[in-house]
Image (cartoon, helix red, strand yellow):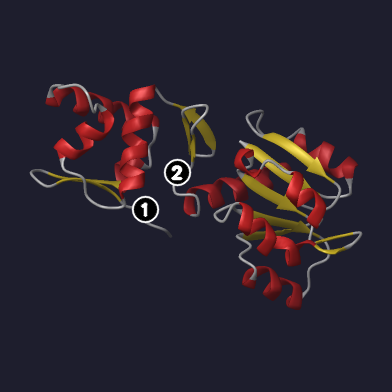
């Protein structure tokens, strides 16, 4: 999981990183500017963690430009500068969460995990063939990944035949094969026991219940 961390307090960032899970990879910038927004590889970024303001102004005001690069990117504010007006601006700009400094590494991890689960709807990492579940990246087999990817992208109920054709387009497989992979997926991803709706004769529908 690659996090873009924007804060000019380098010492604080380095200290907090020591308490965060090793699967979190960080790109640290002192501030967010129009220039470096154009330089960042947004396809590799899964979340932004940032201070409200930098030397040149309010970072939140640049979020529309960030959204034009990657629209569904979760944003967490970590700040000691927030007031009521700032909070309203942040929420109106699509910020997903806000923590006040001083915050512990555990508080940051819990907040990020909650945001990724509720707002990201089981985010996928295509290069790694992994899913973000229960606060960590879980590696999947290629077949398991294709099944989950097919269910997520469909946004509707898929019949068994449709799901099998999506995962195995050039092969005929037994019904037990699909069932075995789904059972393994539920073991690896506990959320699927709630999210995956299966109805005999109708098929499979992945629905995310937000709370």
The extreme bottom residue here reads 85
Which label sits on residue 208? Answer: 1
Q: Is residue 197 left or right of residue 83?
A: left
- Is 54 or 171 nearer to us in this picture? 171
- Quadrant in the picture for the C terminus: bottom left
What percent of the width, then of the height, locates residue 28?
79, 41
**Label 2: which secondary element:** loop
- In the rendered image of this protein, does residue 192 appear above or below residue 84? above
**Separation of disc 2 and disc 1 at Cα?**
9 Å
- Whether residue 194 is visible to the viewer of this picture, yes or no, is yes
What percent of the width, then of the height, locates residue 129?
46, 28
- Whether residue 32 is visible to the viewer of this picture, yes or no, is no
- Is 104 or 152 nearer to us in this picture? 152
Kindly indicate whether the residue at mark 1 contacts the one at mark 2 (C-beta within 8 angstroms): yes
- Quadrant in the picture for the N terminus: top right
What percent of the width, then of the height, locates residue 175?
13, 26
What percent of the width, then of the height, locates residue 125?
51, 34
Who's the residue at 73% across and 36% down the image?
Answer: 26
Q: Which residue is mark 2?
A: 122
The extreme left residue here reads 201
How many marks overall? Answer: 2
Structural crowding at the residue carrying mark 2, measured as other residues with C-alpha within 10 Å and reported as few (<14), some (14–19) or many (≥20): many
- In the rendered image of this protein, does residue 78 appear above or below residue 171? below
- In the rendered image of this protein, does residue 158 appear above or below residue 17? below
Who's the residue at 83% across and 37% down the image?
Answer: 14
**Label 1: which secondary element:** loop
- In the rendered image of this protein, does residue 166 appear above or below residue 91? above
Q: Is residue 79 left or right of residue 193?
A: right
Return the disc, 2 or 1, that comes first in the chain's sequence: 2
Q: Is residue 77 left or right of residue 191?
A: right
Q: Kindly indicate the quadrant of the structure image that contains residue 210.
A: bottom left
């Amino acid at each position: 999981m690659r996090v873009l961390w924007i804060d000019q307090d380098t010492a604080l960032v380095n200290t907090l990183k020591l308490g965060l899970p090793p699967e979190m990879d960080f790109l640290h910038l002192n501030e967010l500017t129009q220039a470096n927004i154009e330089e960042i590889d947004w396809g590799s970024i899964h979340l932004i963690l940032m201070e409200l303001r930098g030397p040149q102004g309010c970072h939140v005001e640049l979020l529309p430009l960030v959204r034009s690069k990657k629209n569904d990117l979760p944003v967490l504010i970590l700040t000691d500068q927030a007031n009521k007006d700032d909070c309203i601006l942040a929420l109106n700009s699509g910020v997903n969460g806000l923590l006040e400094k001083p915050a512990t590494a555990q508080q940051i991890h819990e907040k990020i995990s909650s945001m990724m689960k509720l707002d990201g709807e089981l985010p996928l990492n295509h290069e790694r063939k992994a899913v973000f579940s229960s606060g960590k990246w879980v590696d999947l087999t290629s077949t398991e990944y294709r099944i989950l990817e097919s269910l997520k992208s469909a946004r509707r109920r898929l019949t068994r035949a449709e799901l099998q054709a999506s995962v195995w387009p050039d092969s005929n497989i037994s019904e037990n094969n699909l069932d075995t992979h789904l059972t393994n997926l539920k073991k690896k991803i506990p959320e699927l026991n709630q999210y995956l709706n299966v109805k005999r004769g109708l098929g499979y529908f992945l629905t995310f219940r937000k709370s």
